[in-house]
């Protein structure tokens, strides 16, 4: 399975780091995959950091863009700077719309203090997109399958497996306006959750997987009566 190769500078006194990096990204068709880029400022002063996508060819049906929380940049932007306060961790991600064709994507991200490219951290990422994949997200900590049945009427099920018992994971369901409709913890000692949708109005909803309070994947669910 394609994985991630992470190269990090480990010199003593390094003034920033990337944390919570995933080791593998897999996706089915028509999904949002969020490649985490959590940057922590280890210094005692505010610092601007440059985040750059130096490699990342996408297919015709794919799209990719940087996001900070719910605010996303234009897909044409491949480099920007972000101010990070002392000791602060900024939860950036590069969101990929996986498209409707099988693909093998390779990305290279470069992060460094603005004006100091010699202190660069390189982060190489591989993403595999395959219609046949049952699991919609997989890492060293969690594997999760897509919701079923979809469309749903009364309830919908999601199968998963936690590989790291200390992991905090949950599913949040929201409507097209972003209003939360339900939240479901994913206990390490269980492998399935039931999402109750019998009181939902018919229509399109979305569910997002959160890993350690960071949204990593969003999928669509239809509700019919």
Image: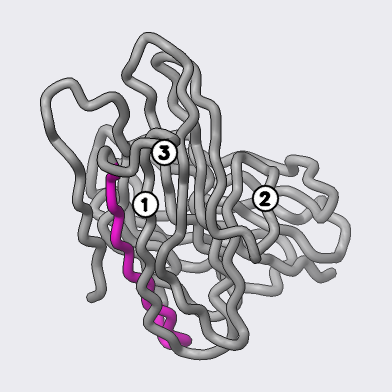
Quick one: label 3, few (<14), some, or many (20+) residues within 10 Å? Answer: some
* Camera-side residue of 51 and 151: 51
Q: Which residues are magenta?
A: 120-133
User: In the rendering, at what x and y percent does residue 122 appear?
Assistant: 28, 52
User: In the rendering, at what x and y percent does residue 83 appear?
Assistant: 54, 27
* Camera-side residue of 31 and 96: 96
Residue 38 got which mark? Answer: 3
User: In the rendering, at what x and y percent does residue 133 appear?
Assistant: 40, 80
- The residue that label 2 is drawn on is 72
**Residue 50 makes an appearance in the image:** yes
Quick one: label 1, few (<14), some, or many (20+) residues within 10 Å? Answer: some
Quick one: label 2, few (<14), some, or many (20+) residues within 10 Å? Answer: some
Calculate the distance from the C-alpha at mark 2 to the C-alpha at mark 1: 18 Å
Asked where in the image residue 100 lies, by quadrant, the reply is: bottom right
Left or right: residue 209 versus residue 221 is: left
Calculate the distance from the C-alpha at mark 3 to the C-alpha at mark 1: 12 Å
* Camera-side residue of 59 and 188: 59
Residue at 63% from the left image edge and 54% from the top image edge: 207
Q: Main secondary structure of the magenta part?
A: strand
Asked where in the image residue 88 lies, by quadrant, the reply is: top left
Calculate the distance from the C-alpha at mark 2 to the C-alpha at mark 3: 15 Å
Nearest to the eye among marks 3 and 1: give it: 1
Element on which disc 2 rests: strand
Residue at 21% from the left image edge and 60% from the top image edge: 5
The furthest residue to the front: 115
Q: Is residue 132 magenta?
A: yes
Residue 161 got which mark? Answer: none
- The residue that label 1 is drawn on is 110
Residue at 55% from the left image edge and 53% from the top image edge: 194
**Residue 189 makes an appearance in the image:** no
């Amino acid at each position: 399975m394609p994985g991630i190769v992470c190269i990090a500078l480990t010199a003593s006194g390094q003034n920033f780091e990337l944390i919570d990096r995933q080791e593998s990204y897999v996706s089915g068709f028509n999904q949002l995959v969020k490649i985490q880029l959590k940057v922590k400022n280890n210094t005692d002063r505010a610092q601007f950091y440059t985040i750059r996508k130096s490699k990342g060819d996408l297919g015709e049906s794919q799209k990719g863009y940087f996001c900070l929380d719910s605010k996303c940049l234009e897909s044409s932007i491949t480099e920007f700077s972000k101010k990070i306060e002392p000791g602060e961790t900024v939860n950036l991600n590069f969101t990929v719309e996986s498209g409707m064709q099988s693909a093998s994507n390779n990305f290279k991200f470069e992060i460094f203090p603005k004006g100091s490219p010699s202190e660069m951290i390189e982060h190489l990422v591989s993403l595999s997109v395959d219609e046949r994949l049952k699991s919609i997200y997989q890492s060293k900590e969690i594997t999760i399958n897509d919701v079923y049945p979809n469309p749903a009427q009364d309830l919908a099920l999601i199968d998963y497996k936690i590989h790291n018992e200390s992991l905090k994971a949950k599913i949040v369901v929201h409507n097209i306006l972003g209003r939360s409709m339900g939240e479901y913890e994913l206990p390490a000692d269980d492998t399935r959750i039931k999402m109750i949708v019998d009181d939902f109005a018919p229509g399109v909803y979305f569910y997002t997987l959160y890993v350690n309070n960071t949204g990593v994947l969003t999928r669509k669910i239809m509700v019919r009566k």
